[in-house]
């Protein structure tokens, strides 16, 4: 086996903490490949040579070296000792723990990022009271561990840090990150250990962890969140959307039922446009799977004909889009007002004509053919003969054209 050795000048520079020798030198090997026979790195050498605590100039050496080569922090020698183990012997580990590099990462940020459990344990043991701030990416060590699904590291931080910081980027928290993985164990520990209403913490879009669970169809997480704090089911994001709105639009049927079973009256809430859960369901890409959840519950019958800010009922929305995808047709429900008009004075049939979907026109015609010639909502236009008002003529022309088109099939 080849014995490793370090250049004498570099060894002495490391012992003295002279950073310029490493910044100005052109190396054939990376810094983490500069090793003594016992596999000590330049960081091992520097810490071993310390007489007392790390002073400010020495702090700069550690910071600069780690900026140049972050992996040095967790690199072991032949005794499986990291620089932090050596620092613990000379009572300098706490100083190293609180240093930050140019990305505002602490030693714990780095240890967690590279999934080094033993180093993480050592850092927390030496300074369990330290409150970690976010780095330039907006991450705390706990968020990094949870986001990468490093369960053991997340557990170590949660159980042994006295006040674990949980912030993440985009306004998210470690709980948001746990929801992404639908990790039941980590979610349970966060809810149990983190004090305060973490379930109500929202990201920059106004999404709570339950909004995220509804979007991703994470049933394990949803169950835990609702058990911990069912009030989050009523929280709205910046667009006024609740978790059940998200679940309905995403066609996450079972998750939608979980929320409704726990908080049935959350279906009464509407978003900033006046859309209720049924509006969202029919506007989703797979409406059939979730529309039935509402149609089968008589207590939600008030949603059937509820109008949004434009006066559109869920039926208007159903016939304004790809109707062929919906097998559970609102038109078949006895309590749906088939002739409801929106603020543009259009019923569902007229909305369908505007969207030019012939299959939907045929379907709605078969149901409403008796009522389509109602003049009550038709404008009276004066033709050349001003004494002969054209009452309801356009709907009848449309019907004739429709019948002609259908007869060609």
Image (cartoon, rainbow, N blue to C red):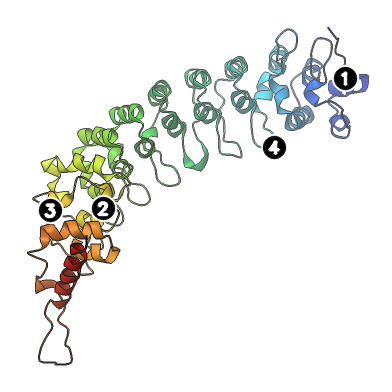
Residue 161 in the image: state x and y as whole percent: 51, 21
Q: Which residue is mark 2?
A: 323
Which residue is more in the foreground, 232 or 379? Answer: 379
> Distance between the Cα atoms at labels 3 and 4?
62 Å
Q: Which residue is mark 1?
A: 11
In the displayed structure, would residue 394 be above or below residue 372? below
1 and 2 marks in contact (CB < 8 Å): no
Q: Which circle's residue, 3 or 4, is located before the other in the chain?
A: 4
Residue at horizontal 39%, vertical 38%? Answer: 212
**Element type where label 3 sits in the image:** loop
Residue at horizontal 24%, vertical 57%? Answer: 359
Q: Nearer the viewer, mark 3 or mark 1?
A: 3
Residue 297 in the image: state x and y as whole percent: 14, 40
Crowding around mark 4 (Cα neighbors within 10 Å: few <14, some 14 to 19, many 20+) is few
> Of the numbered discs in the image, which one, if any, rests on residue 259?
none
Q: Which residue is mark 3?
A: 336
Crowding around mark 3 (Cα neighbors within 10 Å: few <14, some 14 to 19, many 20+) is some
**Element type where label 4 sits in the image:** loop
> Distance between the Cα atoms at labels 4 and 1?
25 Å
Which residue is more in the foreground, 379 or 130? Answer: 379
Which residue is more in the foreground, 394 or 161? Answer: 394
Q: Which residue is mark 4?
A: 102
């Amino acid at each position: 086996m080849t014995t490793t050795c370090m250049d004498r000048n570099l060894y002495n520079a490391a012992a003295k903490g002279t950073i310029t020798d490493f910044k100005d030198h052109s190396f054939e090997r990376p810094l983490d490949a500069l090793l003594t026979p016992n596999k000590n790195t330049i960081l091992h050498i520097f810490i071993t040579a310390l007489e007392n605590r790390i002073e400010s100039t020495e702090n700069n050496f550690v910071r600069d070296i780690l900026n140049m080569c972050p992996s040095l922090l967790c690199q072991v020698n032949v005794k499986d000792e990291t620089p932090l183990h050596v620092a613990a012997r000379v009572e300098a580990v706490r100083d190293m723990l609180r240093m930050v590099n140019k990305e505002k990462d602490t030693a714990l940020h780095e240890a967690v990022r590279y999934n080094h459990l033993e180093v993480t344990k050592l850092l927390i043991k030496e300074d369990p009271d330290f409150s970690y701030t976010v780095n330039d990416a907006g991450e705390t060590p706990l968020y990094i561990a949870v986001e990468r699904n490093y369960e053991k590291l997340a557990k170590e931080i949660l159980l042994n840090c006295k006040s674990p910081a949980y912030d993440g980027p985009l306004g998210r928290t470690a709980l948001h990150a746990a929801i992404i993985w639908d990790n039941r164990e980590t979610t349970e520990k966060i809810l149990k250990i983190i004090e305060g209403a973490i379930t109500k913490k929202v990201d920059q879009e106004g999404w709570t962890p339950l909004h995220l669970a509804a979007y991703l169809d994470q049933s394990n997480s949803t169950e835990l969140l609702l058990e911990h704090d069912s009030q989050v089911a009523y929280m709205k994001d910046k667009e006024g959307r609740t978790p059940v709105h998200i679940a309905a639009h995403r066609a996450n049927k079972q998750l939608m039922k979980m929320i409704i079973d726990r908080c049935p009256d959350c279906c009464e809430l509407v978003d900033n446009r006046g859309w209720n859960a049924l509006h969202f369901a029919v506007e989703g890409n797979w409406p059939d799977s979730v529309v039935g959840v509402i149609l089968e519950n008589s207590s939600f019958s008030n949603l059937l004909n509820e109008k949004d800010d434009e006066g559109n009922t869920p039926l208007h929305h159903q016939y304004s889009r790809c109707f062929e995808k919906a097998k559970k047709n609102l038109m078949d429900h006895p309590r749906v007002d088939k002739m409801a008009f929106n603020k543009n004075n259009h019923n569902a049939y007229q909305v369908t004509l505007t969207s030019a979907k012939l299959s939907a026109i045929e379907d709605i015609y078969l149901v409403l053919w008796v009522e389509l010639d109602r003049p009550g909502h038709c404008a009276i236009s004066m033709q050349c003969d001003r004494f002969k008002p054209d009452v309801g003529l356009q709907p009848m022309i449309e019907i004739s054209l429709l019948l002609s088109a259908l007869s060609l099939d």
